[in-house]
């Protein structure tokens, strides 16, 4: 297939309505060439979720994001300003910051060029003889950064479309959750030997829950959601929050004032390209898939709760079943996606979609839209 991987003709079956359509060919999950095109046409061209504002409490606080289009540092440069820059030294490109923390100065670990947290280069020892070299000409390269509801996003293009355009009707649809007032609590990280799209697809259907999660979540019922903009979603219908395992009664309070739609179940979105935000009755949690290679993906899981919930006595104890649910169900998902990745090595025509795979079909089509548009 490689020759025709970028030909519209190859995706004619995918373009059909859900129940007549076929999925992506296996090469889309294994070809290095296809992966390179995804980095250029998807990850370099769309807003990426990188963290929560409360992870940057003070001036100088920073977090890192290692996206497939290059490492980025996100940093609070003043009380009300967050900036992002390419996490790469202007001398010979060494990565500057790691993990998360607080910095007064950014000192390159290689030859000690030194930057201020606003990106200005203020020291470059040993460069005195270099002709026409001015510190002012080598600041860190800034990237656009924008937030919604406390969620921070970065973009690799200098003049990107507004984040609001990317999000479409997502902010209006989930307004009632009060994301901006929430607090992040804890984080899980996984490294998975699977293409990022297999993980995203898995997160977009409840078809597998009765089999893959039979010991944990059990079978779930889902229906489509009116998603306009760069996202798709399914609503998993359940009056109790599915953020904990069935049978778990030690749950945290529901968010005040949620409407009927929000109370009907958990909305599993996929904010394209690769962030699942889940809006449940008691919290918002997320799965952020970051591709590392065509067959390797980092998954970071986080969750946030209303401040009033975080302030409850015994909150830490009551939070444990939530993380247990995310840990166990995610391990089951990761294992099946690794097994599915291995299966992609077999030459085979694309498979068909079940009616419950409506959001997978939407996602696969969005991916091909990006790949072919360029
Ligand atoms: S690469 Fe940073 S100082 Fe040389
Ligand atoms: Fe799952």
Image: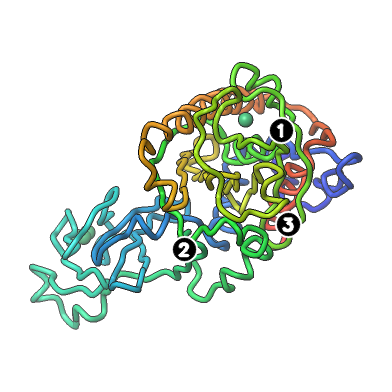
Q: Is residue 173 above or below residue 353?
A: below
Residue at mark 1 to residue at mark 2: CA–CA distance: 30 Å
Q: Estimate the x, y position of residue 22 in percent, counting from the top left.
A: 83, 38
Q: In what element is the residue under mark 3?
A: loop
Relative to 41, 52 lies left or right? left
Q: Estimate the x, y position of residue 154 in percent, counting from the top left.
A: 46, 63
Which residue is at the front of the view, 317 or 279? 317
Q: Quadrant of ligand 1?
A: bottom left
* Residue 227 image label: 3
Residue at mark 3 to residue at mark 2: CA–CA distance: 22 Å
The earlier-in-sequence mark between 3 and 1 is 1
**Disc 2: which residue:** 154
Relative to 154, 34 lies left or right? right
Which residue is at the front of the view, 271 or 14? 271
Q: Nearer the viewer, mark 1 or mark 2?
A: 1
List the single residue furthest toward the right: 20
The earlier-in-sequence mark between 3 and 2 is 2
* Residue 206 image label: 1
Residue located 41% across and 49% down the image: 184
Relative to 140, 253 lies left or right? right
Q: In what element is the residue under mark 2?
A: strand
The earlier-in-sequence mark between 1 and 2 is 2
* Image-quadrant location for residue 171: bottom right
Residue located 76% across and 51% down the image: 225
């Amino acid at each position: 297939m490689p020759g025709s991987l970028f030909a519209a003709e190859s995706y004619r079956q995918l373009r059909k309505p859900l129940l007549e359509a076929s999925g992506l060919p296996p090469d889309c999950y294994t070809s290095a060439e296809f992966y390179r095109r995804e980095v250029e046409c998807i990850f370099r061209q769309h807003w990426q979720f990188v963290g929560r504002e409360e992870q940057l409490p003070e001036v100088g606080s920073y977090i890192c994001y290692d996206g497939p289009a290059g490492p980025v540092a996100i940093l609070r440069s003043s009380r009300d300003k967050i900036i992002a820059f390419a996490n790469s030294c202007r001398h010979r490109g060494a990565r500057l910051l790691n993990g998360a923390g607080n910095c007064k100065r950014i000192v390159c670990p290689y030859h000690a060029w030194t930057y201020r947290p606003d990106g200005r280069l203020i020291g470059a020892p040993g460069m005195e003889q270099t002709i026409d070299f001015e510190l002012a000409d080598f600041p860190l390269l800034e990237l656009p950064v924008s937030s919604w509801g406390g969620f921070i996003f970065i973009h690799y293009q200098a003049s990107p479309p507004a984040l609001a355009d990317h999000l479409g009707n997502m902010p209006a649809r989930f307004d009632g959750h009060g994301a901006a007032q929430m607090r992040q609590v804890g984080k899980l990280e996984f490294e998975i030997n699977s293409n990022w799209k297999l993980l995203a697809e898995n997160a977009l259907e409840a078809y597998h829950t009765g089999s893959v999660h039979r010991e944990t979540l059990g079978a779930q019922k889902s229906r489509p959601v009116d998603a306009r903009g760069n996202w798709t979603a399914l609503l998993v219908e359940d009056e109790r929050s599915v953020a904990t395992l069935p049978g778990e009664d030690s749950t945290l309070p529901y968010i005040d004032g949620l409407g009927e739609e929000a109370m009907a179940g958990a909305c599993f979105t996929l904010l394209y390209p690769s962030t699942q935000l889940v809006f449940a009755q008691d919290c918002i949690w997320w799965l952020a898939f970051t591709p590392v290679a065509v067959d390797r993906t980092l998954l970071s899981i986080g969750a946030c709760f209303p401040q009033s919930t975080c302030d409850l006595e015994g909150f830490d104890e009551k939070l444990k079943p939530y993380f247990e649910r995310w840990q166990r169900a995610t391990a089951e998902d990761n294992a099946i996606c690794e097994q599915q990745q291995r299966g992609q090595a077999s030459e085979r025509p694309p498979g068909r979609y079940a009616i419950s795979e409506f959001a997978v079909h939407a996602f696969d089509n969005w991916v091909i839209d990006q790949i072919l548009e360029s």
